[in-house]
Amino acid sequence: MRPLLRRLLPPFLLLPLLLLAAVLFSPSAPNPFISFFGSFSLEEPDIWSARRVVEWKACNWWKNASLPALPAKTNGYIRVDCYGGLNQMRRDFCDGIGIARILNATLVLPKFEVAAYWNESSGFADVFDVDYFIQQTKGFVEVVKELPEEIASREPYRVDCSKRKGQFDYVEAVLPALLEHRYISLTPAISQRRDRYPLYAKSALCQGCYNALRLNKALEAKGSELFKLIPKPFLALHLRFEPDMVAYSQCEYQGLSSTSLHAIEASRGDRKPWTGDAARIWRNRGKCPLTPKETAFVLQSLKIPTNTTIYLAAGDGLMEMEDFTAVYTNVYTKSSLLNSEDIFRMHGNTKAALDYYVSINSDAYIATYFGNMDKMVSAMRAVNGHYKTLALSRRAFANFTAIGLKGVELADALWKSHREDFVMGRGTALPDCFCEFTL
Ligand SMILES: *[C@@H]1O[C@H](CO)[C@@H](O)[C@H](O)[C@H]1NC(C)=O
Ligand SMILES: *[C@@H]1O[C@H](CO)[C@@H](O)[C@H](O)[C@H]1NC(C)=O
Ligand SMILES: *[C@@H]1O[C@H](CO)[C@@H](O)[C@H](O)[C@H]1NC(C)=O
Ligand SMILES: *[C@@H]1O[C@H](CO)[C@@H](O)[C@H](O)[C@H]1NC(C)=O
Ligand SMILES: *[C@@H]1O[C@H](CO)[C@@H](O)[C@H](O)[C@H]1NC(C)=O
């Protein structure tokens, strides 16, 4: 894949520009000029041209695992019950794959419980390709589509680990119930360390999560239709500035419209914003979502041209987007590209799958926050060798503005810290199944 800059330029312009860039960036040259909110100077290479030192890739220990045979006799059947948004459900399901293997159990298809979050129902098979999943996990973990007759009529015995804190052992905590009831439903604990799992269980998790989940045919076709409609090359941007996100962050912002303020207030519940010193410390720890205006500023600091085609991988609830589109003018969303009736008929879950599809296939991906979707997308981009992936640093932005940096100085500081993150593979570090490779 060719770098974004090179695709944006006719080849005959490239050499002189690179020479000019070399002059501008030599140690003795003055600071590169940046004209904010004006025309962008293409002489400057963007963030993706920085030479990386470290890259995250799928670890060889699971890509080429030599696995012990699966146990001849199963200890029972496990259904993973998943809640929240699409990528949170996937995270929990992935965890469940590893747990099933530790327990020498058989996995049945998970329950994707979406009603609470999306107000609709849409299960695993509505999103993912079931047969592909079963085929790709062969040898790693046993999976069945249908339960054996003698337990098919029963509801599973529920084991909820989601609230459990600290270290605990799945064999100790779950195996007795599995052996007794033969069929259980399980919600994994959120933050269990997996480094003590036996290698075959870790491999099952990695293979199941990153090499066995692809969208079902219908969604893949829709995703591909959407992808084809976006002018190339393009940057997929996951911008998180929705009322619930802002309310949850407990941050306060100056200069928001009254519509936004009302929407945030309505989502607040009992989470009151921090004030005074606590608010300042909170912000400097990088806890406050970047506004669309701040996001546009950071992207310009990264020398991403303002005429770059941007696909906004986000729902409809974004606030203050005019501040972003006033700077970056080529912005597309799925609702602007697809037939509105199509979109209207789709579930939140399947709509999220479209953003996921576009984001893992885009030339570049930038997240303003490193949440469940961003982790999943970064991982799949790493699997597919798309390295232009970056999470913006809210902490750096807060820090630099807190010490009074503005304009070109601020842009310069942001450029340096993000460049460092990109070069060193920081900010989008991936746990468990991925390893750092020195380039
Ligand atoms: C894993 O497989 C790939 C390609 O099949 C090969 O290049 C690599 O050397 C293998 N790694 C190990 C550790 O066996
Ligand atoms: C699973 O099977 C392996 C080998 O077949 C065995 O070593 C391990 O103790 C078993 N674990 C459980 C929880 O049954
Ligand atoms: C959920 O859907 C029902 C029926 O479609 C609707 O009446 C209700 O208002 C919705 N609830 C929320 C929270 O959107
Ligand atoms: C952006 O502007 C530059 C210079 O004006 C131009 O060469 C390039 O084709 C434009 N890119 C897009 C995607 O419009
Ligand atoms: C932010 O500021 C703190 C101290 O105020 C410092 O320790 C930290 O390294 C800074 N982080 C960044 C990303 O600049």
Image (cartoon, grey):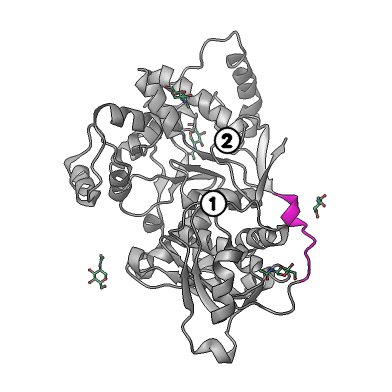
Query: What amino acid type is highlighted by mark number 2?
Result: Arg
Earlier in the chain: of badge 2 and badge 1, it is 1
- Residue farthest along the bottom direction in this orientation: 149
Task: Measure the alpha-carbon separation of dots 2 and 1.
Answer: 15 Å
The residue indicated by pointer 2 is: 426
Q: Residue at x 40, y 24 (%)?
A: 399
Rendered view: 397 above or below 2: above
Q: Position of residue 312 (x, y in %)?
A: 42, 48
**Number of marks in picture:** 2
Q: What residue span does the magenta drawing correspond to?
A: 59-69
Q: Quadrant of residue 250?
A: top left
Residue on which disc 1 sits: 377
Count neighbours of disc 2 (C-alpha within 10 A) and say few if under 14, some if 14 to 19, many if 20 or more.
some
242 vs 183: above or below: above
Label 1 is placed on what type of residue?
A: Val
Labelled disc at residue 21: none
State whether residue 386 is above or below residue 154.
Answer: above
Residue 107 percent across, percent down from the top left: 60, 74
Tell whether label 1 touches label 2 (CB within 8 Å). Answer: no
At numbered mark 1, what does the secondary structure look like: helix, strand or loop? helix
- How crowded pointer 1 is (Cα within 10 Å; few <14, some 14-19, many 20+) is rated as many
Front residue of 239/31: it is: 239
